[in-house]
Image (cartoon, helix red, strand yellow):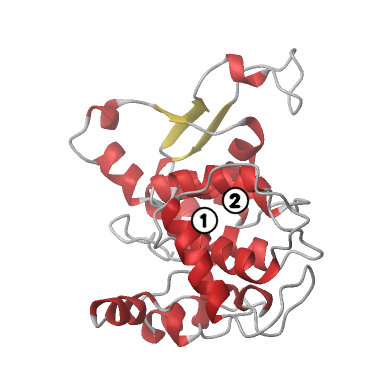
Amino acid sequence: MASSPSVTESSGIWEVKKVTQILSNTTDMIQVTAATEDDINTDAAPKSSKPFQALIHKSLLCFFSPYYRAALQGGFLEASKKSVVLELDIEDRQYFVGWLYSGQLPDVPMPGHLFELYIFADKTDILALRRAIMTKIIRMEHKMMPTFHEIAVALDSLPSTSPLYRWLLDTCVHHWVSKYPIAVTLPNGFLVDWIKGAADRTCATTEGYCSECPCCEQNSCNYHEHESAEEWTSTCGASKEIQAKLPDHSYLVNETTLEIDGM
C-alpha cells in the first residue's frame, strides 16, 4: 500500500491520488461546525435546519492547510480539540467540505458567489482551494462582472498581491462600462491601479470578450500565484486533471517581485 503523503507538505492542487492515499491510511476524524448557530436562518437554509456539523479527516484538512496543520498538530490549544469552527456561510461550508473530498466546486451563476470562500482559503492558507476557485471563475461561461459591493468586500479582505485582486483589476480595466454605477467606496490603492491600467489599455472596454484582456484568455494559471515556471511544471503543468497553460511572464510571483524590486 502506498504511504500517505506527509502532512508536513502542502498540496498546491487537488489530486485524486494523494487524497486517496490520505483517506486509505488515516482514520483520525475531526468535527467542523458553524461559526454561530443563528446564522443558519437564511434563505439558503430554512429555519428548521439544524446547526451545520460534519466529520472530516483531520489529516486531509492539515495536508491542504498549513494554517490548520499548525493549529491542530502544533503546540496550540486547538491541537487538543476535536472540532474546528468554519467562519463561512451555509453554502460555502458545504462547498468547502465537498471540495476537500472531490476537488470539485459547484457551478454558480456569478463569480462573486465564490469570493467569501476565496477569502477563507486565503486566511487559512489553502492554496489548492484558491487555485480551484480561480479556475472556476476564469472558466465560467457567460460570467457577468461582479457587483461593486462584492468587489469592495473582497478588496477589504485581500492584499494587492492576491490573484483575486489582480483578476478584479483586470476585469474592471477591460470590462467596466459607465452603465455600471460605482455605488460603493473602493480602496484608494485599487482605484490608482485601475487608473494606471486604463491608461495602459490599448483596446476599448467591452462587456463581452476582449482578445487583449488577461481575464478573457481562459488561462486560469495566470491567477494561480505560481512562483515560477518550474513550480507550475511540478503542479498544474504535471496534472492530468487540469487543462493548464503556462502563466504569462508577468503573472509569475517571483517575476512580478523582481519587476517591483527593480522599479
Residue occupying image coordinates x 45% and y 78%: 251
Instruction: Answer few, some or many: residues within 10 Å of disc 2's Cα (few below 14, many 20 plus, some between 14 and 19).
Output: some
Looking at the rendered structure, the secondary structure element under dot 2 is helix
Residue 50 appears left or right of 130: right
| Amino acid at pointer 2 | Trp
In the depicted view, which residue is nearer to us: 46 or 194? 194
Image quadrant assignment for residue 261: bottom left
**Mark identifier at residue 129:** 1
Instruction: Note whether residue 165 is visible.
Output: yes
Residue 242, how many percent across, how many down? 61, 75
Image quadrant assignment for residue 132: bottom right
Question: Does residue 169 lie above or below 85 as drawn?
Answer: below
Instruction: Please identify the quadrant where the C terminus is shown.
Output: bottom left
Residue occupying image coordinates x 30% and y 37%: 72
**Mark identifier at residue 45:** none
Q: Are marks 1 and 2 in contact (CB under 8 Å)?
A: yes
Residue 33, how many percent across, how many down? 51, 26
Residue occupying image coordinates x 46% and y 44%: 156
First-in-chain label (1 vs 2)? 2
Residue 143, how many percent across, how many down? 76, 61
Residue 48, how many percent across, how many down? 75, 12
Q: Which residue is mark 2?
A: 99
Instruction: Please identify the quadrant where the N terminus is shown.
Output: bottom left
